[in-house]
Image (spheres, coloured by chain):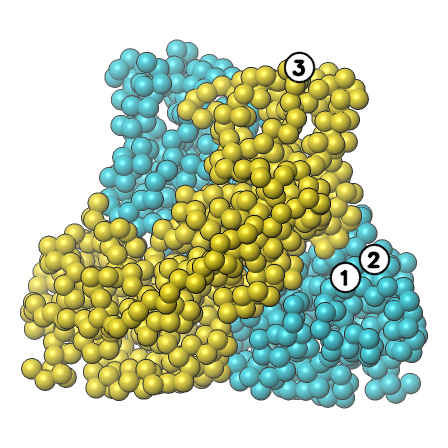
Chain colours: A yellow, B cyan
Amino acid sequence: MDKTAFWNELAAQFSVDSIRATTAAGSGHPTSSMSASHLAAVLFSDHFRYDVNDPKSPGNDRFVLSKGHASPLLYSIFKAIGVISDEELLTLRKFGSPLEGHPAPLESMPWVDVATGSLGQGLPMALGMAIGQRLAGSPGRVWVLIGDSETAEGSVWEAMQAASYHGLSNLIAILDMNRLGQRGHTMLEWEGATYADRARSFGWHVIEIDGHDVTQIDEAYREAEAANGPAFIVARTLKGKGVALVENKDGWHGKALDAEQAKQAIAELGGERSLSVSLPAPEYKAPSNGSKPVQLPVYTDGIATRKAFGETLAALSARSDVVVLDGEVGNSTYTEDFDKVSPERFVQLFIAEQNMIGAAIGLRVLGHTPFAATFGAFLTRAFDFVRMGAVGRTSIALCGSHAGISIGEDGPSQMALEDLAMMRAVHGSTVLYPSDGNSTAHLVSQMADLEGISYIRTTREKTNALYGADEKFPIGGSKVLQSSAGDKVTLVGAGITVFESIKAAQLLQAQGIPARVIDAYSVKPIDAATLRQAMSDTGLLVVVEDHWIDGGLGDAVLAALADGGASLGGRVIKQAVTQMPGSGKPEELRDWAGISAAKIAETVTAALR
Amino acid sequence: MDKTAFWNELAAQFSVDSIRATTAAGSGHPTSSMSASHLAAVLFSDHFRYDVNDPKSPGNDRFVLSKGHASPLLYSIFKAIGVISDEELLTLRKFGSPLEGHPAPLESMPWVDVATGSLGQGLPMALGMAIGQRLAGSPGRVWVLIGDSETAEGSVWEAMQAASYHGLSNLIAILDMNRLGQRGHTMLEWEGATYADRARSFGWHVIEIDGHDVTQIDEAYREAEAANGPAFIVARTLKGKGVALVENKDGWHGKALDAEQAKQAIAELGGERSLSVSLPAPEYKAPSNGSKPVQLPVYTDGIATRKAFGETLAALSARSDVVVLDGEVGNSTYTEDFDKVSPERFVQLFIAEQNMIGAAIGLRVLGHTPFAATFGAFLTRAFDFVRMGAVGRTSIALCGSHAGISIGEDGPSQMALEDLAMMRAVHGSTVLYPSDGNSTAHLVSQMADLEGISYIRTTREKTNALYGADEKFPIGGSKVLQSSAGDKVTLVGAGITVFESIKAAQLLQAQGIPARVIDAYSVKPIDAATLRQAMSDTGLLVVVEDHWIDGGLGDAVLAALADGGASLGGRVIKQAVTQMPGSGKPEELRDWAGISAAKIAETVTAALR
């Protein structure tokens, strides 16, 4: 069979298998798969370099199915490259099958690198992979298949601008322009020239083709491979290509064919086939590990935890796996301290938080250890990417600076007040909130090796030194800062409110009320045992946080104490922000919100009256 | 004084006042204000139509300061148009002053329409205002000043595409291309032609000018006003224009001048001035209110709550203030039912959730009542916009469909599992989660009149009818579905888990364990009194939810019971999703997660053993 014939046959096989799998499942997206069958057939027959026995090798090409609903196509490819069987293909969408409705990188599905299915995320992740390949000295390329509907997501354009800015010649995007979205036509339908203009204006090399003409596709891939900079292929396609019942027809998004329709469709496509493709493995030798021992910074004086975060990152730069991503606020989060010592592993992505998180996930795929930081308030921008990172079992470290009303004069738009709630709700996450320099250094250092998504919340203001450099800060731990047998109340704080709690304890001591003080630096997992002991000893916990009252430290404490149907064992009072703040000095705002030392002491005396 | 001289003098006044205000505050962004002084001077002298005595009039032009950190410029404008005094100007950033670090639409600051300060949000909000003006028959225009750094946010391009798609000739964006961001140069520095290409490719009429040449500015505004479609003005500017110490200098972002520096700078700018501008009020007559009485749908049979949501919206279309926004999933959320009856008030924004929420906030400014809907999972995409909506005291209604693992085969990327946590953490929010058709209809209907941001969570599957059409569903209420004097446990559910709880109660009854069942349809505010009574009566609450275990209904119940230091009064067991789901049938997944009737019953029997 000559190449052209083979490509067309393989494309037909992909379409047939996509129909078979979705009909067996009774749901799914056959037509969205079929529009890209030719694009995939040529790619995997003649362009993709991949070691199927070592799917995680940094030397491999990467394929990102950004339009994750076309998973039947992906699994049909996996069958053709010999990593899953036909029987497995037909388990699509069934309970317990790794062939989920949208692709996820399960242990039993190692050929998937990232979870997709929330649209517009594939290109940011692919961007991170392309940067990661460059850092790893990989000969590989990243191929990303994007749907036309998803180009409406701004995150796509965030990645587009960053790819040309960073000159990523190893990044190739293929636009499957099939004109039809979920509920009707897309915004631009078949205006290929408009897509082309947009991509070109964002600095990409652009090629326009008929996405069902395998010769044009092959030539486009060759041109893209040779391009100086990222390449964008606008492929005009037909949704449901090759089956008259569904081809270019509205109303067929996300619908499986019934058995009879499938039978006819498969016949129309020339029947079942069992072609296979042997992928050529790339030649790749990993660079020698240049890591040196890490010397954590040591603090004897006060420092802002955001600054300690930056200095610890700079120390971690001794590890060659660590990369740091910035959203043009590195002089506020202090990631600039890393940039100063390891600029080659500092990735500037400008003000585009979604793309920053997507790129971090992509960098992780290549084996790097990414830290991404911005204001905690602006991390909310990337919640969907963080969520999808968890679905994709990624391990990345995030930092949100400028926590709470304590930032002061800049006002509520810049105050992180919902970040703890957001990050606690991320599956498998770790949420940390240090109060001083040495605790920050120890926690940041541990984040580099944590599984899952970890988050550290830092404070704008300078805070006093509380701990010595040799103190240990295990994840899930806490610190009892002061304690006596006769304690009548426990003040539980984290970050800035630890200091307010210490001062409140002094005020209370003067009134003859001994108070225990706990630094709950690990918000998730939280140190339930220490909290329970404190409750047992004192009968009253006042939890003080610079965060909205819903979903933060207070709720975490309640959930920990009540876990498994336990009694709280006493009273819990949450002191947190309950009204919309304005501008003002940090101490003015803390007092206004009821989380200053004076207000904490008042709360305690009222509660003990 | 001739016009040109006046414009230049007014620009100098704006720069001087920006310096005075920030120096008085000791912080703030004078240089980011100064780059746009000429742009603002010409706009407010000769183009802006506004009734200062009726700032909320739909007939007014609107000015959106998307680069919210340039608030000193905005307040300097407010002084020149006579709505604040010079004394007030100098309260910038002080505790209690309405002149916050970033603009917010406080009651005492009615000339601000939306909160800005999280970058890239002004244009989506302006887009909503422009659509809102069109719907209101307003002669007004929306002028939005954007910074160059913030064009890196994808949300800007989401709004760009939507503005040309909707043909908004009343929308004019002014790009203050001052080349310098927070930490150094912007991605494109002074590449005006690249910005112009991008804006043009996104369908805008583009004009490139020197942003300090008042004649060019005036001509550009005239051209923009006459353009057929949205207009984008690329204005090349100097950050800190006019003061040698800071002009076009790195390291001066977000820094106030000290007193001596300010004195010299003001001298360099020609000293203080007290020019004023009298804005011409527009001619506008509101269209007659075409609202008709609303007939809510009535359900006697089962229906999916997402479908009941859509049908209720269709019924609410009788109110002429109601508008509905879609992110190209209207056939899943069923907002398409509104489109069918009121297409003129149905706004299609394609797959761009950030822009959808921004546009909703903008529509609200014009007096409309926006409902915006997408999958609950994808609403996480817009968290920062929702957050800023709360900072901006907006009132909008949101719907997240496809709640939880109960969506089944599509897998975790499409499952809303953190939406309750996210929406509970929004200041002033209302969070609703109905179980059947009639409760949905009543709650959706109330959302149209709620203050703040309200959220309703809907279910993909059809559920049985539980309530009659005359039942009332007050916000903050709940329903006790079954109850007896001897109840040994209370099952608390919401949405889909109400039905699992009812079935579990039947299983428990068969084992001789009478169970109370509560439908907690109002998650925030929650019906603490009914929960407390149930705990007092039964001593055990099992809270069952199709959501991650952190931050959802279970935590809301705990917080309500423990409020003010109260004892829980008994045991609370949370049954929720704790492991990452895959694909499968809804009932398979619920059983796997422990939230099926059988698993609930097992939990109860184990707890009572």
Task: Report the disc number at residue B25.
Answer: 2
Question: Tag 3, which chain?
Answer: A
**What secondary structure is found at the residue carrying circle 1?**
loop
Query: In the picture shown, does residue A507 fall above or below B258?
Result: above
Query: Which of the two marks, 2 or 3, is nearer to us in this view?
Result: 3
Asked whether, in this view, residue A41 is left or right of residue B2, the answer is left
Q: Residue at x 8, y 63 (%)?
A: A263
Q: Is residue B82 visible?
A: no
Cα distance in 3D space between marks 2 and 1:
7 Å
Question: Tag 2, which chain?
Answer: B
Query: Which of the two marks, 3 or 1, is nearer to us in this view?
Result: 3
Q: In the rendered image, which residue does mark 1 sit on?
A: B28
Q: In the rendered image, which residue does mark 3 sit on?
A: A486
Q: Residue at x 21, y 45 (%)?
A: A96
Are discs 3 and 1 both within one chain?
Answer: no
Q: Amino acid at mark 1?
A: Gly
Q: Report the quarter where the N terminus of chain A lies.
A: bottom left
Cα distance in 3D space between marks 2 and 3:
46 Å
Q: Nearer the viewer, residue A45 or B347?
A: A45
Asked whether, in this view, residue A458 is left or right of residue B383, the answer is right
